[in-house]
Image (cartoon, coloured by chain):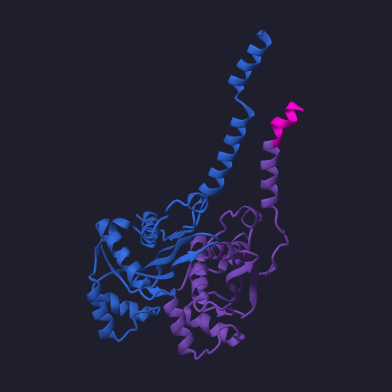
Chain colours: A purple, B blue
């Protein structure tokens, strides 16, 4: 009985940790071409992302994060955004989210890159559940190889919502910036890990 | 009596269950709130900070809803660089050259325009960046500052990014949320973000 009483606080804490740590572990879908040698991709350009959220600048915010994470991986060089925007304008590309193969190869030639990253932001903001408002970010990223114009990597990542501790104990949830970082980092990780 | 004395002595040596529990909770709290890894930086292999003696800080892109966030962050960047003995081109001179070259100051700059800017300002490296968040956010029961920035050092000649740092800071601390303690101000948070970003470079 004494041992039960002594062990009870420790067990309770461990239980909380387990419950708060467990979340739906369904792996977000991602695709990566098995027959592509990614080591030849040394330079990439990140195109302006399509913004499907209600936050006006979500596209550029996530775009900067993607650039930062790609650079931080140490695997590729990233073209400065001004140069990308200039090339998109010079090639009269109106919509950077639905490029055909010819446009992809042209961009690759002009920007001197082997890969082009494009995508969209489905959600960027706060979602209300009960009395809590938690940040939520959902992004889709793709990489096309400029030699062939084929999509060689794509991923969709969602991050955010209220944790168990936030909902029941008012614990701090991440900020929107941290949530965005987590989503982008998880997404890029599926590429760099390969 | 002896048995009771022995039990008391044993408890003193081992410690009471209450103190163990408090220690475990404290360790968990420290782990949960101590771990943060929001600064992600990239440094080109050839960059040498001792050669960064003269830099032009270009106008920042403002991706926030705060009208003056870009200028505030730019000022903090300049002050931090000056405190590290880096010679920073006067901001008015930078804007004059932008006007002369007819470049929009708050948009991303192409390689060609960067080269023109560099030639006229007589610098080899420029610092360009964006402010993603600069705001007081409202949590469940508290308000807290949140700042996020992306800073890059770009080589004028090649247009290559020599250094990149994305960083964010903010959120309500445990003391603010549960004990009503005063948190940092927006300005203090911004200074911290800039300082920590440059600490990773210098």
Q: Which residues are magenta?
A: A1-8
Look at the image and tell me whether residue B115 can be seen.
yes
Q: Quadrant of the N terminus of chain B?
A: top right
Q: Quadrant of the C terminus of chain B?
A: bottom left
Q: Residue at x 28, y 59 (%)?
A: B51
Horizontal side of B81 relative to B28 (left or right) equals: left
Residue A26, percent from left and from top: 73, 62
- In this view, A147 is above or below B199: below
> Residue A81 versus residue B24: which sits nearer the camera?
B24
> Residue B93 versus residue A3: which sits nearer the camera?
A3
What secondary structure predominates along the stretch shown in magenta?
Answer: helix
Which residue is outermost to the bottom?
A92
Residue B120 in the magenta stretch? The answer is no
Residue A6 in the magenta stretch? The answer is yes
Q: How many marks?
A: 0
Residue B140, percent from left and from top: 55, 61
> Residue B114 versus residue A113: which sits nearer the camera?
B114
- In this view, A1 is above or below B52: above
Residue A65, percent from left and from top: 50, 67
Residue B9, percent from left and from top: 61, 15
Horizontal side of B42 relative to B188 (left or right) equals: right
């Amino acid at each position: 009985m004494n041992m039960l009483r002594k062990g009870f606080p420790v067990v309770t804490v461990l239980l909380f940790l387990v419950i708060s740590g467990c979340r739906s572990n369904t792996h977000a879908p991602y695709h990566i071409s098995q027959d592509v040698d990614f080591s030849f991709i040394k330079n990439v350009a990140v195109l302006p992302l399509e913004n499907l959220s209600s936050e006006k600048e979500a596209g550029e915010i996530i775009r900067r994060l993607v650039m930062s994470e790609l650079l931080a991986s140490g695997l590729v060089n990233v073209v400065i955004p001004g140069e990308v925007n200039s090339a998109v304008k010079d090639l009269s590309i109106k919509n950077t989210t639905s490029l055909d193969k010819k446009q992809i190869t042209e961009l690759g030639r002009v920007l001197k890159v082997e890969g082009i990253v494009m995508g969209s932001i489905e959600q960027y903001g706060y979602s209300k559940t009960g009395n809590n408002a938690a940040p939520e970010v959902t992004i889709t990223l793709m990489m096309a190889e400029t030699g062939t114009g084929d999509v060689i990597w794509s991923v969709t990542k969602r991050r955010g919502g209220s944790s168990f501790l936030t909902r029941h104990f008012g614990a701090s949830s991440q900020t929107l910036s941290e949530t965005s970082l987590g989503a982008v980092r998880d997404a890029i990780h599926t590429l760099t890990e390969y | 009596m002896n048995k009771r004395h022995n039990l008391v002595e044993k408890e003193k040596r081992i410690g009471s269950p209450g103190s163990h529990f408090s220690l475990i909770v404290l360790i968990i709290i420290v782990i949960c709130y101590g771990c943060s890894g929001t600064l992600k930086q990239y440094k080109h292999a050839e960059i040498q900070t001792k050669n960064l003696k003269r830099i032009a800080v270009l106008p920042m892109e403002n991706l926030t809803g705060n009208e003056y966030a870009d200028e505030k962050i730019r000022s903090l960047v300049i002050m931090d660089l000056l405190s590290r003995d880096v010679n920073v081109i006067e901001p008015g001179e930078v804007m004059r050259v932008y006007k002369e070259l007819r470049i929009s100051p708050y948009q991303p700059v192409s390689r060609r325009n960067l080269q023109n800017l560099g030639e006229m300002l007589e610098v080899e490296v420029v610092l360009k960046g964006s402010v993603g968040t600069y705001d007081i956010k409202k949590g469940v029961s508290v308000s807290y500052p949140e700042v996020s920035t992306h800073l890059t050092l770009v080589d004028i000649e090649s247009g290559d990014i020599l250094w990149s740092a994305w960083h964010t800071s903010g959120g309500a601390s445990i003391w603010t949320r549960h004990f009503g303690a005063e948190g940092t101000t927006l300005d203090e948070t911004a200074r911290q973000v800039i300082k920590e970003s440059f600490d990773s470079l210098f």
